[in-house]
């Protein structure tokens, strides 16, 4: 069966129309997707300056927090070295004109405060001398930078017989990274 020229023209026109309709549908979908992507890009570009500012503020806060952490850690020795503290205590006792009768360093215990763990050495310091000299010794313990991480936790003073004695209880804190 032989098709006439008219049928071939109609068939060609139908194929051409179908191709044009398919191209239009694809183009319409892509145009809609392009519009949606443009809107999303505009929204992202609107948010970007705020996010950059927020990131810069957070970086500043991080820097400040790290600096504060470094300062805090610098106040606490890495460990409580009994030999060094013993030398310092005898030096302070000599400077204060008190007699430090004995010095025993027990094994430091761990103390957790929040997320930070400290090494704590508790000492009892038996001293004797005049009341003023004992107070001078305590004052130096509280203010000497070598004892910045030291806390005086108790003072028991005994007076009588012409001599004053005291037992001073201190905690020495060390940072346990």
Image: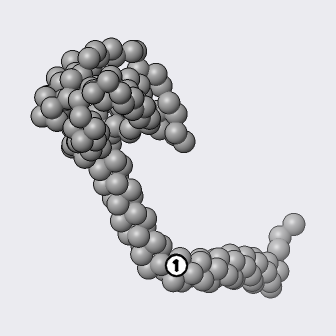
Local secondary structure at mark 1 = helix
Disc 1: which residue: 47
Q: Is residue 14 above or below residue 149?
A: below
Among the 4 quarters of the image, the one containing residue 1:
bottom right
Among the 4 quarters of the image, the one containing residue 35:
bottom right
The number of discs equals 1
Q: What's the colour scheme?
A: one colour
Q: Residue furthest front?
A: 161
Q: Position of residue 86 (x, y in %)?
A: 22, 21
Q: Position of residue 48 (x, y in %)?
A: 47, 76
* Quarter of the figure that contains the C terminus: top left
In the picture, measured across the screen, residue 32 lies left or right of residue 176, that is: right
Q: Residue furthest right?
A: 1
In the picture, measured across the screen, residue 153 lies left or right of residue 160, that is: right
Q: Nearer the viewer, residue 168 or 33?
A: 168
Q: Is residue 43 above or below residue 154?
A: below
Q: Position of residue 92 (x, y in %)?
A: 17, 32
For image coordinates 21% across by 23% down, the residue present is 99
Among the 4 quarters of the image, the one containing residue 57:
bottom left
For image coordinates 16% across by 35% down, the residue present is 96
Q: Nearer the viewer, residue 154 or 22?
A: 154
In the picture, measured across the screen, residue 165 lies left or right of residue 26, that is: left
Q: Nearer the viewer, residue 176 or 94?
A: 94
Q: Position of residue 49 (x, y in %)?
A: 44, 79
Query: Can residue 23 be seen here?
Result: no
Q: Residues within 10 Å of mark 1 (few under 14, many from 20)?
A: few
Q: Nearer the viewer, residue 70 or 168?
A: 168
Q: Is residue 21 above or below residue 72?
A: below
For image coordinates 69% across by 77% down, the residue present is 29
Query: Can residue 120 be seen here?
Result: yes
For image coordinates 34% across by 54% down, the residue present is 68
């Amino acid at each position: 069966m032989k098709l006439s020229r008219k049928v071939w023209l109609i068939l060609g026109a139908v194929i051409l129309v179908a191709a044009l309709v398919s191209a239009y549908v694809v183009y319409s979908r892509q145009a809609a997707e392009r519009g949606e992507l443009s809107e999303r890009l505009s929204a992202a570009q609107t948010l970007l300056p705020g996010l950059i500012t927020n990131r810069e503020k957070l970086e500043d806060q991080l820097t400040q927090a790290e600096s504060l952490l470094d300062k805090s850690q610098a106040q606490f020795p890495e460990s409580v070295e009994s030999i060094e503290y013993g030398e310092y205590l005898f030096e302070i006792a000599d400077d204060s004109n008190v007699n430090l009768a004995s010095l025993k360093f027990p094994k430091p215990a761990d103390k957790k405060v929040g997320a930070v763990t400290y090494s704590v050495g508790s000492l009892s310091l038996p001293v004797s001398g005049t009341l003023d000299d004992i107070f001078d010794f305590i004052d130096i313990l509280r203010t000497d930078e070598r004892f910045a991480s030291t806390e005086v936790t108790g003072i028991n003073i005994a007076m009588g017989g012409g001599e004053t004695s005291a037992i001073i209880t201190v905690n020495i804190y060390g940072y346990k990274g």
